[in-house]
Amino acid sequence: MRQCVYCQSTPETLTRDHVFPRGWYSQFTPKSVQRWIVPCCLECNKRHGENEESLLVRFGLALDPGDPEFRDIIEKANRSIVAAAATSNQDSEYREKLLLKLRDELLTGGAELAEHALVLRDGSWAGQDGQFTALQIDKRALDTLATKLAIGLTYWDEKTILSGSYSLTVSPVNEPDPKINEFLSSSGREVSGGPSIYALWGFHPRAPNHRVYYFEIFRLIRIYVVGIPSPHEVDQT
Ligand SMILES: [Zn+2]
């Protein structure tokens, strides 16, 4: 039975989902890099596609515009808010609205932080203090992306479906934990998707039934995802 790895539905039509969004691979991604593709329903594909589009604009704005490795990614993100790059009037309006929305969301010293927002400043997750200009990233959007990466990668690698059997907690960090990552790289799995994505995962050093994932996106966004078996799964074993 073929099912969507994200929601476990078994629709008649399944599509192929790029666990790491196809358009997020930098042009410097080596040809040999294997793309992570998993079965996914149309609804999840659409939902994740929209979430990723909205995150990419924000990540693109946070990347160093002079970084040649990500020039194509930054251009792609920037184009989505340039009305002149639109292909129709409707598209042009959409881009203008998005630009205004982003301007509204920009934080300067003393501005109120939206509920569920994380602050990204000069490429780091930051508190809201002092004078600065920073981007707000919706924590729920980041959770959706990070849990998708964990679920998708686990299915791609070992055909295990995490959805439903693990509860996943997402923690963005500024720096990786060297002890955890050393343990994971000696005992777990490591995949590099070129400059855009690096993933490291395995079981927790002190709680071997807990899964730990580390993702580094665009050498900018660093995220841990910890998976704890859901209670009913524990009962079954
Ligand atoms: Zn689905």
Image (spheres, rainbow, N blue to C red):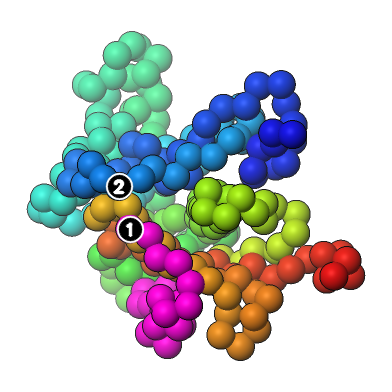
| Residue 177 relative to residue 142: left or right | left
**Which residue is labeled 2 in the image?**
33
Residue range (magenta): 171-192
Residue type, mark 1 in image? Ser
Question: Image height check: is 47 above or below 135?
Answer: above
- Label 1: state its secondary structure: strand
Relative image position of residue 221 (x, y in whole percent): 36, 62
The front one of 130 and 53 is 53
Q: Name the residue at 70% across, 64% down.
A: 167
Image quadrant where residue 67 sits: bottom left
**Which residue is labeled 1 in the image?**
192
| Residue 8 relative to residue 147: left or right | right
The reply to whether discs 2 and 1 touch (Cβ–Cβ < 8 Å) is yes
Relative image position of residue 18 (x, y in whole percent): 46, 39
The front one of 163 and 223 is 163
Residue type, mark 2 in image? Val
Question: Image height check: is 157 above or below 82?
Answer: below
Of the two numbered discs 2 and 1 on the same chain, state the one appearing first in sequence: 2
Image quadrant where residue 35 sits: top left
| Residue 65 relative to residue 108: left or right | left
Q: Which residue lies furthest to the top in this view?
A: 88
The front one of 66 and 162 is 162
In magenta stretch: residue 178: yes
Relative image position of residue 160 (x, y in whole percent): 65, 54
